[in-house]
Image: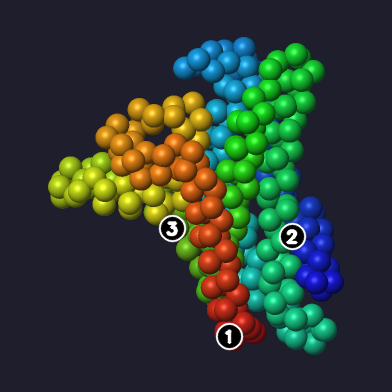
Amino acid sequence: MKELWLTAKLDIAESLRARWFAIYCLIFGGLVALLFVFGLTESRVLGFIGLSRLLVTFIQLTMAILPIFVLITTVRSVAGDREAGVFEYLLSLPVGLAAWFWGKIVGRYLIIFLPVFAAMTGAVLWALARGIEVPWGMFAYYTALLAAMGWCFLGIGMLISALARSTDVAQGMAFMVWLTLLLFLDLILLGVMIQEQVRPEVAVGIALANPLQVFRTAALTLFDPQLIVLGPSAFVILDTFGAAGYQVFAILYPIAIGALCAGAGYLFFRRGDLP
């Protein structure tokens, strides 16, 4: 455990010095600032006012930004160290492969989640200072969703990084994974179902295998419990899970995906040719 935490601290220190981390913090901090500037805390949409409206908008923007940022920065981890010749020094130090790999994951998870959480906390503090009501239940659930999604794409990124032999290949694979998940959102699946006359249950099942779709749908359940905007697909989801059950599924499923991908990445990393 000591080696793991030392590796995590080293990865955190390296990330804090990197330019991508400054841009990452600026994007999420800037998003919240812009949402306040444009007065979203004073607007009313679908009955949501104040901080609720800001959180709904922030979570939708985060869905598009967070996954690609996590993937691109994470895939450079193992692949970049392999290209830089770090593994040659690693083998000569009293640091186990498991401690190094999982320490990387712990450090990277903290560094990608804390700025997002800080941005949301900043919004809450501003709302409290302005006397705006804080929807604590929504805040807690959205925080859990973001934590689960960050872990999911971190695990996918570490798997890609362990498989790829160069940074360029790893970044290309990460972009293709992100693009594929985007393509298989509602619009693409609706077109496939219409053309091929696929059963709705099958189409919805394919959709729910996509962690981005799960995240998006779960975010909708807080202000649209009946999922009216999804049309007939809502009946399949609600009949299978129920509103509360789906919200739990939307947190546990991405966590499971991230854990499985991280575990597979470690197996490939341990059995592969490190240098």
Locate residue 154: give its quadrant.
bottom right
Q: Which residue sits at x=78%, y=64%?
A: 8
Q: Which residue sits at x=68%, y=22%?
A: 134
Q: Which residue position holds label 2?
A: 107
Do the CB atoms of the residues marked 3 and 2 lie less than 8 Å apart? no
Q: Residue 39: x percent and y percent?
A: 62, 15
| 60 up-or-down from 80: above or below | above
Q: Residue 263: x percent and y percent?
A: 58, 71
Circle 1: residue type: Arg
In this view of the protein, which residue sits in the foreground, 133 or 258?
133
Mark found first going from the N terminus, 3 or 2: 2
Q: Which residue position holds label 3?
A: 176
Q: Residue 195: x percent and y percent?
A: 15, 46
Circle 3: residue type: Met
Mark found first going from the N terminus, 2 or 1: 2
Tell me the element at label 1: helix
Q: Residue 185: x percent and y percent?
A: 37, 44
| 196 up-or-down from 83: above or below | above
The residues bearing labels 3 and 1 have C-alpha atoms spaced at a distance of 25 Å
In this view of the protein, which residue sits in the foreground, 262 or 32?
262
Circle 2: residue type: Gly
Which label sits on residue 271? Answer: 1
The residues bearing labels 2 and 1 have C-alpha atoms spaced at a distance of 23 Å
Give the label, 3 or 2, closer to the camera.
2
